[in-house]
Amino acid sequence: MKLINKTVIVTGGANGIGRVYAAHLCSLGARVVVADIDFENAEETAATLNEASRRPIAVAVRVDVTSPEDTARMSEVAVENFGTIDVLVNNAGSYPHVEFEDIDYEAWRRVIQINLDSVFLCSKAVLPIMKAQGKGKIINIATNLVWVGLPAMVHYITAKAGIVGFTRSLARELGGCGITVNAIAPGAVIPKGNYSDESRSRVDMIVNNQCVKRPQQPEDLVGTLAYLASDDSNFVSGQIITVDGGLTMH
Ligand SMILES: NC(=O)c1ccc[n+]([C@@H]2O[C@H](COP(=O)([O-])OP(=O)(O)OC[C@H]3O[C@@H](n4cnc5c(N)ncnc54)[C@H](O)[C@@H]3O)[C@@H](O)[C@H]2O)c1
Protein backbone atom coordinates (compact mmCIF):
# COMPACT_ATOMS: atom_id res chain seq x y z
CA MET A 1 0.00 0.00 0.00
CA LYS A 2 2.75 2.42 -0.90
CA LEU A 3 0.32 5.16 -1.95
CA ILE A 4 -1.75 5.08 1.22
CA ASN A 5 -3.67 8.35 1.70
CA LYS A 6 -2.08 10.00 -1.32
CA THR A 7 -4.53 11.89 -3.51
CA VAL A 8 -4.02 11.32 -7.23
CA ILE A 9 -5.85 13.03 -10.08
CA VAL A 10 -6.02 10.89 -13.22
CA THR A 11 -7.19 12.82 -16.27
CA GLY A 12 -8.82 10.61 -18.87
CA GLY A 13 -9.40 8.10 -16.07
CA ALA A 14 -12.84 7.01 -17.24
CA ASN A 15 -11.73 4.73 -20.06
CA GLY A 16 -8.82 2.86 -21.59
CA ILE A 17 -5.43 2.93 -19.92
CA GLY A 18 -6.44 5.75 -17.54
CA ARG A 19 -9.08 3.55 -16.00
CA VAL A 20 -6.46 0.82 -15.41
CA TYR A 21 -4.18 3.46 -13.83
CA ALA A 22 -7.00 4.59 -11.50
CA ALA A 23 -7.73 1.02 -10.37
CA HIS A 24 -4.08 0.22 -9.74
CA LEU A 25 -3.46 3.43 -7.78
CA CYS A 26 -6.49 2.67 -5.58
CA SER A 27 -5.23 -0.88 -5.02
CA LEU A 28 -2.07 0.69 -3.57
CA GLY A 29 -4.07 2.83 -1.14
CA ALA A 30 -4.43 6.06 -3.13
CA ARG A 31 -7.55 8.21 -3.24
CA VAL A 32 -8.30 8.94 -6.87
CA VAL A 33 -10.06 11.74 -8.71
CA VAL A 34 -11.31 10.40 -12.03
CA ALA A 35 -11.28 13.52 -14.21
CA ASP A 36 -12.79 13.05 -17.63
CA ILE A 37 -15.00 14.69 -20.22
CA ASP A 38 -16.91 11.39 -20.33
CA PHE A 39 -18.68 11.91 -17.01
CA GLU A 40 -20.90 8.84 -17.29
CA ASN A 41 -17.93 6.48 -17.45
CA ALA A 42 -15.99 8.55 -14.91
CA GLU A 43 -18.84 8.07 -12.42
CA GLU A 44 -19.05 4.38 -13.25
CA THR A 45 -15.28 4.00 -12.77
CA ALA A 46 -15.37 5.80 -9.40
CA ALA A 47 -18.38 3.76 -8.24
CA THR A 48 -16.62 0.48 -9.17
CA LEU A 49 -13.49 1.53 -7.26
CA ASN A 50 -15.50 2.57 -4.19
CA GLU A 51 -17.40 -0.72 -4.22
CA ALA A 52 -14.21 -2.75 -4.52
CA SER A 53 -12.54 -0.97 -1.57
CA ARG A 54 -15.77 -0.62 0.46
CA ARG A 55 -14.89 2.99 1.28
CA PRO A 56 -15.06 6.31 -0.59
CA ILE A 57 -11.63 6.39 -2.22
CA ALA A 58 -12.65 7.65 -5.66
CA VAL A 59 -14.62 10.59 -6.96
CA ALA A 60 -15.59 11.54 -10.51
CA VAL A 61 -15.46 15.03 -11.95
CA ARG A 62 -16.49 16.19 -15.40
CA VAL A 63 -13.52 18.03 -16.87
CA ASP A 64 -12.68 19.16 -20.36
CA VAL A 65 -8.89 19.28 -19.97
CA THR A 66 -8.72 22.03 -22.60
CA SER A 67 -10.79 24.37 -20.39
CA PRO A 68 -9.14 26.65 -17.78
CA GLU A 69 -12.40 26.79 -15.80
CA ASP A 70 -12.89 23.01 -15.78
CA THR A 71 -9.31 22.25 -14.79
CA ALA A 72 -9.49 24.78 -11.94
CA ARG A 73 -12.68 23.09 -10.76
CA MET A 74 -10.93 19.69 -10.98
CA SER A 75 -8.41 20.83 -8.35
CA GLU A 76 -11.16 22.24 -6.16
CA VAL A 77 -13.03 18.92 -6.24
CA ALA A 78 -9.86 17.03 -5.27
CA VAL A 79 -9.22 19.31 -2.28
CA GLU A 80 -12.90 19.40 -1.24
CA ASN A 81 -13.03 15.60 -1.18
CA PHE A 82 -9.58 14.56 -0.02
CA GLY A 83 -7.81 17.69 1.34
CA THR A 84 -4.62 17.38 -0.75
CA ILE A 85 -3.32 16.81 -4.26
CA ASP A 86 -0.20 14.66 -4.09
CA VAL A 87 -0.01 13.48 -7.69
CA LEU A 88 -1.37 14.64 -11.05
CA VAL A 89 -1.40 12.12 -13.90
CA ASN A 90 -1.81 13.97 -17.20
CA ASN A 91 -3.19 11.02 -19.15
CA ALA A 92 -6.14 12.40 -21.18
CA GLY A 93 -5.33 12.40 -24.86
CA SER A 94 -6.56 11.72 -28.34
CA TYR A 95 -4.63 10.19 -31.22
CA PRO A 96 -6.39 10.47 -34.59
CA HIS A 97 -4.64 8.98 -37.63
CA VAL A 98 -4.76 11.58 -40.40
CA GLU A 99 -2.26 12.19 -43.18
CA PHE A 100 -0.49 15.52 -42.97
CA GLU A 101 -2.05 16.85 -46.19
CA ASP A 102 -5.52 16.21 -44.74
CA ILE A 103 -4.94 17.88 -41.36
CA ASP A 104 -6.48 21.34 -41.50
CA TYR A 105 -5.47 24.05 -39.07
CA GLU A 106 -8.50 23.54 -36.86
CA ALA A 107 -7.79 19.81 -36.47
CA TRP A 108 -4.12 20.58 -35.79
CA ARG A 109 -5.05 23.08 -33.05
CA ARG A 110 -7.54 20.69 -31.48
CA VAL A 111 -5.05 17.81 -31.22
CA ILE A 112 -2.41 20.12 -29.75
CA GLN A 113 -4.99 21.42 -27.28
CA ILE A 114 -6.11 17.99 -26.07
CA ASN A 115 -2.63 16.49 -25.83
CA LEU A 116 -0.43 19.45 -24.85
CA ASP A 117 -2.43 22.49 -23.74
CA SER A 118 -4.21 20.12 -21.34
CA VAL A 119 -0.91 19.32 -19.62
CA PHE A 120 -0.22 23.04 -19.19
CA LEU A 121 -3.72 23.75 -17.82
CA CYS A 122 -3.92 20.79 -15.43
CA SER A 123 -0.41 21.43 -14.09
CA LYS A 124 -1.27 25.12 -13.54
CA ALA A 125 -4.45 24.08 -11.74
CA VAL A 126 -2.67 21.85 -9.18
CA LEU A 127 0.42 24.02 -8.73
CA PRO A 128 -0.82 26.37 -5.96
CA ILE A 129 -1.89 23.39 -3.87
CA MET A 130 1.34 21.43 -4.41
CA LYS A 131 3.40 24.54 -3.69
CA ALA A 132 1.52 25.19 -0.45
CA GLN A 133 2.09 21.54 0.54
CA GLY A 134 5.79 21.84 -0.32
CA LYS A 135 5.59 18.65 -2.35
CA GLY A 136 3.88 17.04 -5.31
CA LYS A 137 4.40 14.89 -8.36
CA ILE A 138 3.33 15.60 -11.91
CA ILE A 139 3.39 12.59 -14.25
CA ASN A 140 2.79 13.22 -17.94
CA ILE A 141 1.88 10.53 -20.45
CA ALA A 142 3.79 10.91 -23.72
CA THR A 143 4.39 8.14 -26.31
CA ASN A 144 7.42 6.23 -27.55
CA LEU A 145 6.57 7.65 -31.00
CA VAL A 146 8.33 10.87 -30.00
CA TRP A 147 11.63 8.96 -30.42
CA VAL A 148 10.88 7.49 -33.86
CA GLY A 149 8.01 9.38 -35.52
CA LEU A 150 5.16 7.81 -37.49
CA PRO A 151 3.26 8.91 -40.59
CA ALA A 152 -0.31 10.20 -40.28
CA MET A 153 0.13 11.35 -36.66
CA VAL A 154 2.21 14.51 -37.05
CA HIS A 155 -0.11 16.65 -34.89
CA TYR A 156 -0.31 14.04 -32.12
CA ILE A 157 3.39 13.27 -32.02
CA THR A 158 4.28 16.97 -32.13
CA ALA A 159 2.06 17.54 -29.09
CA LYS A 160 3.59 14.59 -27.25
CA ALA A 161 7.11 15.77 -28.13
CA GLY A 162 6.09 19.08 -26.54
CA ILE A 163 5.43 17.13 -23.36
CA VAL A 164 9.10 16.08 -23.30
CA GLY A 165 10.29 19.71 -23.27
CA PHE A 166 7.55 20.66 -20.82
CA THR A 167 8.53 17.84 -18.44
CA ARG A 168 12.22 18.68 -18.44
CA SER A 169 11.77 22.44 -18.14
CA LEU A 170 9.08 22.36 -15.48
CA ALA A 171 11.07 19.81 -13.48
CA ARG A 172 13.95 22.31 -13.34
CA GLU A 173 11.63 25.18 -12.44
CA LEU A 174 9.67 23.41 -9.68
CA GLY A 175 12.41 21.31 -8.09
CA GLY A 176 12.99 23.97 -5.45
CA CYS A 177 9.32 23.73 -4.43
CA GLY A 178 9.58 19.99 -3.73
CA ILE A 179 7.68 19.10 -6.90
CA THR A 180 8.95 16.47 -9.34
CA VAL A 181 7.86 16.28 -12.97
CA ASN A 182 8.34 13.11 -15.01
CA ALA A 183 6.79 11.41 -18.01
CA ILE A 184 6.06 7.90 -19.21
CA ALA A 185 6.41 7.13 -22.91
CA PRO A 186 4.32 4.01 -23.57
CA GLY A 187 4.51 1.90 -26.69
CA ALA A 188 1.42 0.83 -28.59
CA VAL A 189 -0.98 -0.87 -26.22
CA ILE A 190 -2.57 -3.74 -28.12
CA PRO A 191 -6.07 -4.64 -26.96
CA LYS A 192 -6.61 -8.36 -26.40
CA GLY A 193 -8.94 -10.01 -28.88
CA ASN A 194 -9.28 -11.22 -32.42
CA TYR A 195 -7.51 -9.16 -35.04
CA SER A 196 -8.15 -8.69 -38.72
CA ASP A 197 -5.28 -9.88 -40.95
CA GLU A 198 -4.16 -6.26 -41.36
CA SER A 199 -4.11 -5.62 -37.61
CA ARG A 200 -2.40 -8.96 -37.00
CA SER A 201 0.47 -8.09 -39.33
CA ARG A 202 0.86 -4.69 -37.62
CA VAL A 203 0.93 -6.36 -34.18
CA ASP A 204 3.46 -8.95 -35.42
CA MET A 205 5.65 -6.17 -36.81
CA ILE A 206 5.62 -4.30 -33.48
CA VAL A 207 6.23 -7.41 -31.37
CA ASN A 208 9.07 -8.61 -33.63
CA ASN A 209 10.85 -5.30 -33.08
CA GLN A 210 10.44 -5.35 -29.30
CA CYS A 211 12.93 -7.04 -26.97
CA VAL A 212 9.99 -8.46 -25.00
CA LYS A 213 8.17 -10.67 -27.50
CA ARG A 214 4.52 -10.10 -26.68
CA PRO A 215 1.95 -7.33 -27.22
CA GLN A 216 1.93 -4.54 -24.63
CA GLN A 217 -1.04 -4.41 -22.25
CA PRO A 218 -2.20 -1.48 -20.06
CA GLU A 219 -1.03 -3.47 -17.01
CA ASP A 220 2.56 -3.21 -18.30
CA LEU A 221 2.46 0.52 -17.49
CA VAL A 222 1.10 0.51 -13.95
CA GLY A 223 4.35 -0.43 -12.17
CA THR A 224 6.18 2.56 -13.64
CA LEU A 225 3.25 4.84 -12.83
CA ALA A 226 3.11 3.61 -9.22
CA TYR A 227 6.87 4.12 -8.88
CA LEU A 228 6.69 7.70 -10.15
CA ALA A 229 3.66 8.41 -7.93
CA SER A 230 5.32 7.00 -4.80
CA ASP A 231 8.03 8.28 -2.47
CA ASP A 232 10.35 5.65 -4.02
CA SER A 233 10.95 8.13 -6.87
CA ASN A 234 11.54 11.25 -4.76
CA PHE A 235 15.03 11.73 -6.26
CA VAL A 236 13.83 11.28 -9.86
CA SER A 237 12.77 14.34 -11.87
CA GLY A 238 12.75 15.55 -15.44
CA GLN A 239 12.85 12.00 -16.78
CA ILE A 240 10.98 10.38 -19.64
CA ILE A 241 10.68 6.66 -18.90
CA THR A 242 9.93 4.64 -22.01
CA VAL A 243 7.84 1.52 -21.39
CA ASP A 244 7.53 -0.28 -24.73
CA GLY A 245 9.11 -3.70 -24.33
CA GLY A 246 12.39 -2.31 -25.64
CA LEU A 247 11.01 -1.35 -29.05
CA THR A 248 12.85 1.95 -28.78
CA MET A 249 15.90 2.66 -26.65
CA HIS A 250 16.47 6.13 -25.38
N1 LIG B 1 -3.24 3.35 -26.39
C1 LIG B 1 -1.96 3.40 -26.73
O1 LIG B 1 -1.44 2.51 -27.42
C2 LIG B 1 -1.10 4.54 -26.28
C3 LIG B 1 0.26 4.54 -26.58
C4 LIG B 1 1.06 5.60 -26.17
C5 LIG B 1 0.49 6.64 -25.44
N2 LIG B 1 -0.83 6.61 -25.17
C6 LIG B 1 -1.39 7.73 -24.41
O2 LIG B 1 -2.01 7.21 -23.24
C7 LIG B 1 -3.14 8.04 -22.90
C8 LIG B 1 -4.38 7.18 -22.77
O3 LIG B 1 -4.60 6.52 -24.00
P1 LIG B 1 -5.83 5.50 -24.19
O4 LIG B 1 -5.47 4.58 -25.28
O5 LIG B 1 -6.27 4.96 -22.88
O6 LIG B 1 -6.95 6.51 -24.75
P2 LIG B 1 -8.54 6.38 -24.70
O7 LIG B 1 -9.05 7.09 -25.91
O8 LIG B 1 -8.96 4.96 -24.48
O9 LIG B 1 -8.92 7.22 -23.41
C9 LIG B 1 -8.68 8.60 -23.36
C10 LIG B 1 -9.51 9.20 -22.25
O10 LIG B 1 -9.30 10.62 -22.29
C11 LIG B 1 -10.57 11.25 -22.22
N3 LIG B 1 -10.54 12.54 -22.89
C12 LIG B 1 -10.37 12.79 -24.22
N4 LIG B 1 -10.46 14.11 -24.45
C13 LIG B 1 -10.66 14.71 -23.25
C14 LIG B 1 -10.86 16.05 -22.84
N5 LIG B 1 -10.83 17.07 -23.70
N6 LIG B 1 -11.04 16.30 -21.53
C15 LIG B 1 -11.04 15.28 -20.62
N7 LIG B 1 -10.91 13.99 -20.95
C16 LIG B 1 -10.71 13.72 -22.26
C17 LIG B 1 -11.54 10.29 -22.91
O11 LIG B 1 -12.89 10.53 -22.55
C18 LIG B 1 -11.01 8.96 -22.41
O12 LIG B 1 -11.59 8.60 -21.17
C19 LIG B 1 -3.21 9.12 -23.98
O13 LIG B 1 -2.54 10.28 -23.56
C20 LIG B 1 -2.47 8.49 -25.14
O14 LIG B 1 -1.95 9.44 -26.02
C21 LIG B 1 -1.65 5.61 -25.56
Image: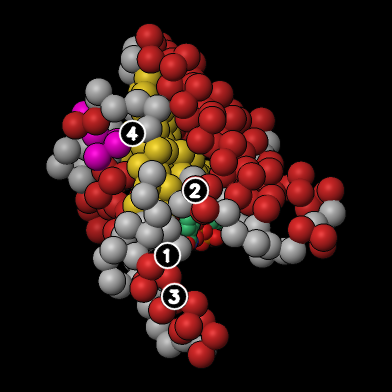
- Give the residue drawn at x 68%, y 41%: 113
| Circles 2 and 1: CB atoms closer than 8 Å | no
| Region in magenta | 227-231
| Mark 3 residue type | Met
Instruction: Give the image quarter of residue 209.
Output: bottom left
- Give the residue drawn at x 68%, y 43%: 112
| Circles 2 and 4: CB atoms closer than 8 Å | no
Report the Cα–Cα distance between label 2 and label 4. 32 Å
Report the Cα–Cα distance between label 2 and label 1. 17 Å
In the picture of the structure, the residue carrying the numbered disc 3 is 205
Q: Visible in this render: residue 19?
A: no
Element type at mark 1: loop
Element type at mark 2: helix
Instruction: Give the image quarter of residue 52.
Output: bottom left
| Mark 2 residue type | Trp
In the picture of the structure, the residue carrying the numbered disc 2 is 147
Mark 1 C-beta closer than 8 Å to ligand 1: yes
User: 121 left or right of 134?
Assistant: right
Decide which of 115, 161 is in the foreground and name it: 161
Instruction: Give the image quarter of residue 171.
Output: top left
In the picture of the structure, the residue carrying the numbered disc 4 is 7
Residue 64: percent from left, percent from top: 63, 44
Mark 2 C-beta closer than 8 Å to ligand 1: no
- What secondary structure characterizes most of the magenta part? helix
| Mark 1 residue type | Val
The earlier-in-sequence mark between 2 and 3 is 2
Work out whether 8 lies above or below 172.
below
Is 245 inside the magenta-drawn segment? no
Work out whether 236 lies above or below 158.
above
